[in-house]
Image (spheres, rainbow, N blue to C red):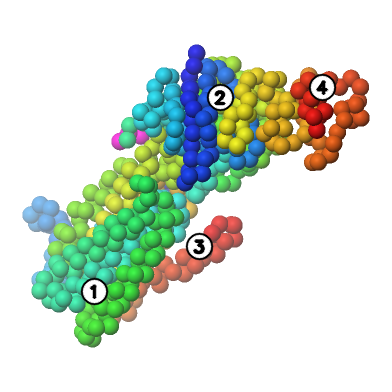
Amino acid sequence: MTVMEAKNVSVSVQDRSILTKCSLTVGRGEFIGIIGPNGSGKTTFLKSLRGIQPISQGQIFLYDHLLTQMTDKTIARQVAYMQQSVKVGFGYSVKDIVMTARYPYIAWWQNSTSKDSQIVEEAMRYTGVWELREKNIQAISGGERQRVFLAKALAQDTDILLLDEPTAALDIGYADDMFRHCQELCHAGKTIVIVVHDLEMAAKFCSRLVLFANGQIVADGEPHIVMNAKNLGKAFHISSTVYEDALFRQRRIYVYPYGVRIRQSQHLRPGVQIPEEASTMILNE
Amino acid sequence: MMHQLQKVYGYGLGLVIAFVILFVVSIHMGTITIPINGAIDEITRAIGFVNGIGAPLDDNQRAVFWFIRLPRLLVGVLVGSALATAGAVMQGVFANPLADPGVVGVSSGASLGAVIAIALGLTSVSMFYMPLFAFGGAFGAVVLIVGLAMRDNKVQPITLLLSGVAVSLFLGALTSGLLTFMNEYRLREFLFWMVGGLDYRRWEHVVIAIGPIIVGISVLFMLARHLNVLVLGDVEARALGQSVMFYRLLFLSIASVITATAVCVSGFVGFVGLVVPHIMRILVGPDHRSLLPLSALAGAVFLVFCDTLGRVILTPIEIRLGIMTALVGAPYFLFLLRRLRAEGGI
C-alpha cells in the first residue's frame, strides 16, 4: 500500500535548481534510506515530502491527497519530521521538548491532557530517555539529544517518520541503536524515510535505498542493487569496491585513493567476492 | 514534574506575599504618612462595610490615599506586569534572551510620537494627547519595521532585528532633530517623559491602561503554550503543524500593544522587560505557561519596589522610576552578560 508518493518533484531556490524531477513511491512499512553526497538534495527532498519546502514543479501525495491542499496540522498528525539538529534557545526540560510533539492534537485554546503525558512517557521509555526527563535539554550529550528528538518524533504518533540524519555525530553504539529502533518500528507497521550519511549502515538496516546525485535520483531499490561501485562512482565520483564481508555477509565499501589506477587482481585477496558492476567499474578505470 | 510544579507555585506564592507587603509599604510611606489601619479603614468602607475596619483617616490623608497613592500604585502594577510579560514574549518570539519590545521600535516610535505632541504644544491642551501620540508612534514604528522585514509573506527574526535597529536609529534621529528646535521648557517636558515615572498618575491613567493591558496579558497567558513551540524555530514549529507566521505576528502585536500602552501612561521605563523575565526564567525554567504569569507578577513587584524606593530613599526628593529601574536593572544585566559568556552563550 502506498502511503506517500512524489511525482516529478523539482525545487529551485532563486533560479538555482536543487531538485530535478524526483519521483518516489513510499510503501507502508518500508524503511527507506536516502543516500548521496553533500549538497545532492537529500534534505531538501525530505523537507518537500513533509511540505515544509515549497516545490516549484510536481506533486506530492499523502494517502492519495495532494499535500499542498492539506493544512500543516493535518499533515503533522500523519507525518513526523525530525531535523538534523535543533537549536533550542532556552533551557527547556527534556520532557517539555518531547511534549511539544502533541501540539497537532491539541486545539489552540486547550492544554495537554494526561493522555498526552502517557503517550510522551511511552515514547521516552522506548528510546530510553525517560530517566532524563527533568534534565535541561542544553545540558545533555549529543547521543542523548538525538534519542530525545526521536522520542519526540514518536510521540507525534504518526504512521510516517521522516528523519534527517538522526545519527550524524553519534557514536557507533548510539547510531546502531538508532537504526535498530527504526527497523523495529518499521516491522511494527510504521514507515520511515531516513537521510543517512553512513552508506554501510544504510545498507545494513534499510529495506530500500534511494541514491541522490546533483538533485536527481540516480538509483532506487534494495540495498544490494543500489549499492554498487558503478552507482557510487556516479554519485560520489570515487572508485571503489563494494564487497560482502565474509563474517557477517554485509556490504562493505573500499574507496581507492583518488586518481589511483587499480587492477582488480593486484589488490584483492583471494576469496573476496566482487559484484560484477564493481569489477567493470574498476576495469574501466 | 511534581518538583517543577512545586517550584512554580512556591515562587508564585512568594511573589504574592512580596506584592502584598510592598502594597502596604508603598501606601504607607511618603512625604505624608498614611497609617496602615487607616488605609484598611478606607478600603473596607469603599467595598461596603459601612463603618469600616480600623481607624479613620483625616481629610488630607484621605485625599493622598485616594488620589495620589492608589492610582500611582495601580498604574505601577499595570505597567510592571505589561512590560515584563511583553519582554518575556519578545524573548520567546526572537528565541533570544536579550530581546525586548524595543527591538521592534516600540520605544523609539513612542518617543517620536511624544516629542511631536510636545512640539505641537498639544500637551498643554489636554493630558490625553501625549499618550495618544506616543501610542500612535509606537504602533506606527512596529508596523513599519514588520512591513520592511516582510518578504514573501515571511518575517525572519534576524531580518526583523536588523530592520528594527535601522528604523529605531532613523526615528531617534528625527526625535533628536525635533528636540534641537525646542525651547527649554518643552525640552524639560520631554526629558521627564523619557525618564519614565509614576508621579502625578491619576485615575485617568489607570482607565487608559487597564483595558488593553489586562486583555492583552490574559490572551498571552492563554496562548503561552504556542510560544513554547514557536521558540523551537520555523522548521520545527511548522513540522508540528503550527501556523508560524500567524502566531509570530500575533505575539508581536499583542506584546507591542501592551508595551505601547504602558509607555504611554508611564513614559519610558527601561530594564523591566529585559531583566524580570530573565530572573524568572532562571528560577522557574523557560516554559511560557508558568513563565508569563510569574513574570507579570514579578514585573509588578519590581516596578512598585523601585518606585517606592525612589520615593522614600531621599524624601522629599523623588528619584524617578526610569532611573531607579535602570540603577537596579543595569548591574544585574551586566552580571547576566558575563555569566552568559562564561556559559559559552552570547
Residue highlighted by disc 1: B115
Camera-near label (1 vs 3) is 1
Asked whether the residues under the numbered discs 1 and 2 touch, taking CB atoms below 8 Å apart as contact, a structural biologist would say no
Specify whether residue A112 is painted magenta. yes
Please provide the residue range marked out in magenta. A109-113
Asked whether the residues under the numbered discs 4 and 1 touch, taking CB atoms below 8 Å apart as contact, a structural biologist would say no
Residue highlighted by disc 3: B336
| Image x and y of residue A38, in percent | 63, 40
Residue displayed at 21% across by 62% down? B136
Residue highlighted by disc 2: A192
Residue displayed at 57% across by 35% down? A215
Q: Amino acid at mark 1?
A: Val
| Image x and y of residue A168, in percent | 64, 38
- C-alpha gap between disc 2 and disc 4: 30 Å
Q: Tag 1, which chain? A: B
Residue highlighted by disc 4: A274
Q: Amino acid at mark 4?
A: Ile
Q: What kind of element bears circle 4?
A: loop
- C-alpha gap between disc 2 and disc 3: 44 Å
Mark 2 is surrounded, within 10 Å at the Cα level, by few (under 14), some (14 to 19) or many (20 or more) other residues, namely: many
Q: Amino acid at mark 2?
A: Ile
Residue at far top of view: A1
Q: Is residue A123 visible?
A: no
- 2 or 4: tag closer to the N-terminus: 2
